[in-house]
Image (cartoon, helix red, strand yellow):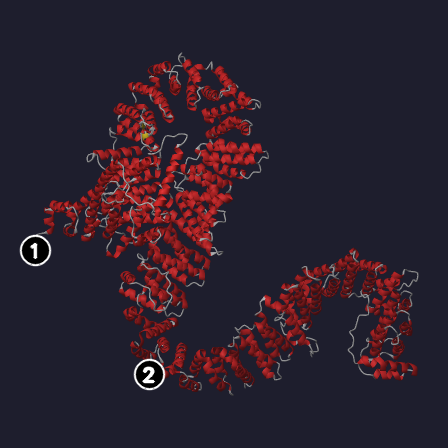
Amino acid sequence: MLCQLKVDAGRYVAANLSKVIGVITAAPVFDESLQNAVMTLSRVAPTIVLPCLFAHVTRCLDDVHHVTNVDYGVFLTPDGEVYDKSVIESVKVEEQGRGNIKRESKAYSYKEQLADIELRKEIETKKREKGLIKETKPQMSKKQQELMQTQLEKEKRIRDECRLFDTALRSAVAMVTAAVDGNAVGVSRHIPELLVKLLPLLTNPIAAPHAARAFIKLGSSAFDDEDKYIGDLVGHVTLRLLEPNCEVDARWCEEKLTVATRRTVGVLCGLTAERAFTAPGFSYCFPFVKCLLRERGPAGAKEDAVVLKALEFTLTHARLRNAPDAPSGNDDDLTGPNLLPRKQMLETLLLTVSTSVGKVYQLASKALLEVAQCASGAAGCSSATQEEIDVLLHGLQAPAMTVRETSLQCLMAMVLELPLMEDDYTDWLKVTRRVWVARHDADEPICIQALQLWSEAGMVVDPALCTLLIDDIIHEEGVVREAAADALANALAAHGNRVDDVLQSIFSTYAQKQQIAATQLDAFGRVLFEGGADEWAARSGLALAVGKISPYLTEEQIEELFTFFVREGLADRNEEVRTNMLKSAVTVITDHGKNNVNLLLPVFEDFLDKAPSSGSFDAVRQSVVILMGSLAKHLDKDDSKVKPIVAKLVEALNTPSQDVQESVANCLPPLVPAIKAEAPILIQKLLTLLLESENYAERKGAAYGLAGLVKGLGILALKQLGIMTSLQTAIENKKNYRHREGALFAFEMLCHMLGRLFEPYIVHVLPHLLLCFGDANQFVREAADDTAKEVMSKLSAHGVKLILPSLLRALEEDSWRTKTGSVELLGAMAFCAPKQLSSCLPSIVPKLIEVLSDSHVKVQRAGAQALKQIGSVIRNPEIQAIVPVLLEALQEPSWKTSTCLAILLETKFVHFVDAPSLALIMPVVQRAFQDRSTEVRKMAAQIMGNMYSLTDQKDLSPYLPEVIPGLKQSLLDPVPEVRAVSARALGAMVKGMGEKCFDDLLPWLMQTLTSEQSSVDRSGAAQGLSEVVGGLGVEKLHNLMPDIIQTAERTDIAPAVKDGYIMLFIYLPGVFGKHFQQYIGLIITPILKALADESEFVRDTALKAGQRVVNLYAQTAIELFLPELENGLFDDNWRIRYSSVQLLGDLLYKVSGVSGKMTTEGGEDDNFGTEQSQKLVMKSLGPERRNRVLSGLYMGRSDVALLVRQAALHVWKVIVTNTARTLREILPTLFQLLLGCLASQSYDKRQVAARTLGDLVRKLGERVLPEIIPILESGLRSDEADQRQGVCIGLSEIMKNCSKDMIMLYIDSVVPTVRTALCDELPEVRAAAAKTFDNLHATIGPKALDDILPALLLQLNDAEVSSYALDGLTQVMAIKSRVVLPYLVPQLTTSPVNTKALAFLSSVAGEALNKHLGRILPALLKSIGEAATPERQTEELEYSQQVVLSIVDEDGVRIVVTELLEVSRGSSLAMRRAACQLLECFCTHTKADFEPLVPQLISGLVMLFRDEDHTVLQSSWQALVAVTKTLDPAEQLQHVSVLRQAVRFATMDLRSDSGQLPGFCLPKGLTPILPIYREGILNGPPELKEQASIGLGEVIKLTSPEALKPSVVNITGPLIRILGDRFSANVKVAVLDTLALLLGKVGVMLKPFLPQLQTTFIKALTDPSRQVRLRAANALGKLIHIHTRVDPLVSELSAGVRAADDSAIRETTLQALRDVIAGAGDKFGDAVRKTMTPALVSLLSHAEDTTRMSAAGCLGTLCASLPEIELQALLIDELLDNDPSADWLLRHGRATALSVALKVAPSKLCNYFPDKIVDVILANTTADRIPIALAGIRSLGFLLCWQLQQEQQTQPQVVTALGKCMNHTSNEIKQLAAQMCLFVSKTTPEKPLPPVVMRPLVSMLVNGTKEKNSVVRSNSELALVSILRLRVDDTTYQNFLSILDPGPRDALSDVYVKSLRKLTSQVEPRDEDIDNTILY
């Protein structure tokens, strides 16, 4: 209508505003027409209408009064009904219940009548329930009717009033709703003022539903349509937190409130991380934030993490600023600070600052300052209102220093907006007053800041302040009262003329605060009105102020003041007030007493004279006395008034009040000069009273007086007047406890009054004090405790150092009493001055904790009590409240530590933590770091992180050396949460205490950062280093980052180092936030490089770093790292592609606001994305980049790496809503990328592009095929090989994804193309063509074979393309071997064999080749053997080797090994050579696992060592080397027995003349088998060690010395090492035998080992095993041959013989000596020989047979080495001495030695005494002792052998004597005679014995064959066979028969027939050594 009338709507509304608003607000019902009107007006003229409209709404909301639940119940009750029937019911019950009760009598008691009534009522109720009584409307009595009417009227008034409220609320809410619908943006500007009125109404049952509805509606105005869900979320969660008196939408209540709160905070922080809400939006969210910060939320919302997020959200919006061109105070700017709820923000943040610590406190303070800054009036900021300033001024009166400090900082930020005197004097005075008080705060930092604010604001001290400050002096907070008192004093200093006004104000205020409202009672004495509380704190502040203003008082005021003191102040009902009044009075006297003595003294005297003697005046009377004493200081010392005053003071000492006595003591020192003469008498009197009085107060007062007098007389009075002597005597008095107690009182007061002057005497008092702690009397112990506290409180730092060591040493004493006293004194040190306390507590508390585990109970109790004392002096109220918990944790650390730490964490600290608090807390924390529990260590770290901000640095520093190791250990904890908390703790401590306190921390972190031990250590170090650098500030980051980035980019560092530095990129961004953003571009490169690292843990770390960067900087740094991620999608390294997909996914998740953690199982085309997320991606990336990114992702779905495919598919499903539609959108970009990748030089890229192409064909079908095929055909003709390859790959994928019918349409083009591509000049193209062939064959079947393979086989004969065709066939074989092989093998193995083609084809044939090996291997061997030239043979061999090496599967390997070993044993040398060469190549170069065939290979190859062909030997040796190299130590042990068996089989029927195996005789012939035996010797079990040693010995026998030489060291070393260890005898025997064999073979080569061998062998001579000793002796005999100096060895052996107590050891040592003598020859020195010979001679008569015979053998062997003279002497003196009278043992020894001498040196002996020797031998033969006779027979045999060997004439008597032996009665002699005949017969094996010798011997042996003894008979038969040479032929037998007489001939013939002929056919027995002196 207005438009039609051409009237401007805005102007019309403005002109008629009052009428319009009147119509709207006056309507009784807010109907739809009014709603439409409001909507229209809100749109037309919002700036005019809305303020008026909302003013009306505000008034309506203000008019709503408090409604109780009863009122609400009345409101819901219909008219005419009573809601509250309780009054009527009570009357009814009273009437019914008690109306008929009679007076109590004997018949009817009162209780019985009541019981009867109850019974009747119960019966009536039951009848009514059963329907026996009809219901009738109860009739009310008149009284009930009156009450009913009254109640109805009352409820009607309530109901009417509530209905008015409800109607008004409905209208108001409807107006708000209509305004929001009409102009949401305009309404949003009024959100703060509306919420202030709406939210309090949520507790009102009538208003709550309307207020909740309006609150939710306002949410839609705070946010635009896109973010509307935020308003709903925040609104409903806020309502749940506020718990309104109405129901909340049930749908929003399904989620747990804790979870909903955390989610909401997360959403708000996430949305505003880069872009803040508008000011109205934040205003709407602020009630939610307020609930969290004021801890009105659920338990979960109280967590620091939630609170920190809420504060971050608040801080973000506190930084809102107006646009630069916007005028100041512009409310149209929704993004400026004008519309923020700043007052509520300030109030809430101040409360948070006052109740928080650590990061919460820091962030809250930061947000608070930012709020103040936004109201500072600066550019972009708004102007602060007085209400906001008042909030901060109120903060200056907070008890917490942090709140006062932060409030001052905020006021400093608002300094330009503070009111000026000329503008608003009242507000200016209010601000000035608060700042003036703050200037006098007890905390110095606050004073400094307040002074700065005072100066900046140009404030001055107004005279009005003087009286206004009285209100602060009576403030409820003590810190405010104290500061105000000082402020008042300084204000009066500037305005002294206001002192009287102030003083009068103090008097009147005191009188007002002195009154207490009386409690009002009714007639029955019931309380109607509680009386007021006593406002003593206000009066105490006034008393304090009086003392402060003392310097500015005038004489008139002093008199008035003291009148007030005496009459009122000193008589106050509160003791603290009286104390402060007295202190102030003393202060005034101190300031003005000198000039007003005459004025004040009469006042005091008058009072003392006139004051009533009642007890109520005692306190005043004592105070007046003290004041008189203080005043007396100003009197002349000669004044007569002084002494009476002193007397009154001394008399006042008996007052049972410590304050009075202390004040008197303080008054006495100045008065002492006036009574100096009477002082000694007075002191004596006080000493007597002190020690003898029975009144406690008198003795205590005497101590005070004594101390006061001493202070006045001087410290020397203690000695001059004998005070210390008297006190020491008293304290040593064991009989009277009062003496001890009084002495302690005196020490306490002396220390108190004299202070540090008394410190020299403390050392003398200390021993007595220790004893008194354990005194039997309780009073003495209590006095000792008090004295100790006082002593400790007065100690200086020097004093602490003086006594602390002695107390700590006392704890080491054995006496429990001494310990107890020392502990109690240490506990008393808690009362030292704060400075001394902080220095000594770190030493004391650990000792006290140790005492808690003392063996004596009393010591334990004393320790616990001492800790309690330390707890009692704690000034921090929060710690004081939990001292019992701390003490329990110290006493029972195993059980209470966890609980204690939990309580500490829950404690909200407002005050600083003092030194005593730290002393109790830090031991608990130190113990917690050693706890096994993860939770306990985490809590300890959290506490340390908070502690730096709660305490003074110097107090915390002593504990750092003990705590830092624990924190370091926790920093390396396996649990990530513990590491995170520990890192934050370290960072916080470094930030709070500075880098100087942690000198070694950074180096340790850098060292641990590169630790190779564990990734956990590196992670903890990286996190700790990040937090520490964060604590040191941004500058430290800028200094470190260049080196960190440079190191992370290096490629020449260890993986662990790189891992550690990359880990820094995980944690540094989180610590520094936006400050780290400048390094994003620099760290992307090292992160991407690390993603391709070879070490998996480095890649994982780099991925985490990339994800962290993406999550933190997804919006701000997208331009920096998105191009890098796009490049990474197409990188050649699959790991980089995989990581790029993951990081790109994280980026897209972050941008689109979706979670990538959802499961995407299902089909590959199932999508989970949303349209909203797609819009956000498009908005953030733009169309071009979005298409490029999605194209790369889609290609990643076809990547060659599985992980890349899976990751890309997952991201695609989460982001994309519809795959087909998205593909159509990105198809141009995708196809462009595909063509580029198909032509790429990278094989992987071509594969990916081809797969993607196939996928496109499969999804989009025939629509794209006609477009793709022509492009691919043209690509096949390209000159670019990469493009041709890409086309083949693409064609392959197309065929794979198309039907057969579609392929057949293009078959004429495809088949020639594939055929040509298979012969392409580039192998990559051929490989791709082979895959195309595979897909072609899969699609069209055998037709592909028929069309393509024949052509390829023909091209093999074409020299130009044969190699290409062959490779093409090879590529086809690699894919279709099972199909192609049966077609190719028959043609290729037909002569001439095409070994080249077989070689190429076999490399790709795989297992399919196995079934054809039986045909291929013979063909290969034949082609090698038939090669015409060596060059051709080499070529054929190479191709054949390629075939053999291509076999890698188990079956194929078994076939190859079996076939080749079989052929290698054949008769054809050429085939053997070829087989061995192939076998050598296979074993050397194959990659197959032939471990199961190793035994077969070892046996077969060792058997080939017998071959005589050098080529065969060399090849088999090389093969065996390769086989044994593949064996690890465990496998080598398994093949020791296999190798031994193989060697034994190889030596069977060995045809070699040398007895050596040809293969072992090659250079380094033992190399293949030596490692096996060596491992068996060194590391095998004992049985295997023995087998290996024996096997090695067998090999040594079969090896030539030349071949052994290279392996001598490798053989000898392990053998010596084994002998040095404790192993079984069998092992040692085997090793010694092997060493002996080695010495025999290559003795000279073992010279380097000579010392070790000699030591080892000699040590073995004492082994318990006889076989070991004998083998050692044998080895020594071999070793002597390479010995250059034999004398020491011989001497050592000789000494061993002499020293041996065990005969077994002695005999083997003699055997060793014999072997050494035999081997040494004439190397002996004369001295050794001359020493050794008598020693051996002396043993010839030894009683033990073995020793005697061994010595004889040794002596006989020595004869070969003796010079002529010595030998002759030995023969004459010993060996040829045939004295029959000599002991037979000696004779036996000589005979045995002679037989051995004849065996080893017959020539030397027979040259000297031939006849004598024969005579002695014959005599020995016929000796009566069998052993001697046996020795003689051996001598005969050895002599006869020598004669036969020398072809000398045998002596008949020798032969005859031997022949007669068979006639002896002893079988032993007969047996030996036969054995000697056998021995003699073998002397000349090539010819028979002379007849002259043979005849007697044969006759004897024939007789021997007839003996009964089987052994004799057997030996005789063997001897006959040997003498007659029957094993050769029977010629000698026949010839001998011919010379025999008939009788002997017949006897011999008979023996021959019966036994000799049979023996001839049997195996000849092994020869045995006939010498019985040799040990075996």
**Residue 600 falls in which quadrant of the image?**
top left
- From the top left corner, tell me how far across and down residue 1374 is, in percent: 45, 78
The label on residue 4 is 1
Structural distance between the alpha carbons of marks 2 and 1: 75 Å
The label on residue 1305 is 2
- From the top left corner, tell me how far across and down residue 1508 is, in percent: 64, 80
The label on residue 839 is none
Q: Amino acid at mark 2?
A: Leu
Figure quadrant of the N terminus: bottom left
Figure quadrant of the C terminus: bottom right
Kindly report which numbered mark, 2 or 1, lies closer to the viewer in this rendering. 1
The residue at the far left in this view is 5
Q: Residues within 10 Å of mark 2 (few under 14, many from 20)?
A: few
C-beta proximity under 8 Å, tags 2 and 1: no
Q: Taking 1771 as reference, is 121 above or below it? A: above
Relative to the observer, which residue lies in front, 169 or 822?
Answer: 169
- Give SS at disc 2: helix
Q: Taking 182 as reference, is 1552 above or below it? A: below
**Residue 1625 falls in which quadrant of the image?**
bottom right
- Give SS at disc 1: loop
Q: Is residue 372 visible?
A: no
Earlier-in-chain disc, 2 versus 1: 1
Q: Taking 1779 as reference, is 371 above or below it? A: above
Q: Is residue 1412 left or right of residue 82?
A: right
Q: Is residue 830 left or right of residue 592?
A: right
Relative to the observer, which residue lies in front, 291 or 1064?
Answer: 291
Q: Residues within 10 Å of mark 1 (few under 14, many from 20)?
A: few
Q: Is residue 760 visible?
A: yes
- From the top left corner, tell me how far across and down residue 730 is, in percent: 55, 22
The residue at the far top in this view is 640
- From the top left corner, tell me how far across and down residue 1749 is, in percent: 83, 63
Q: Amino acid at mark 1?
A: Gln
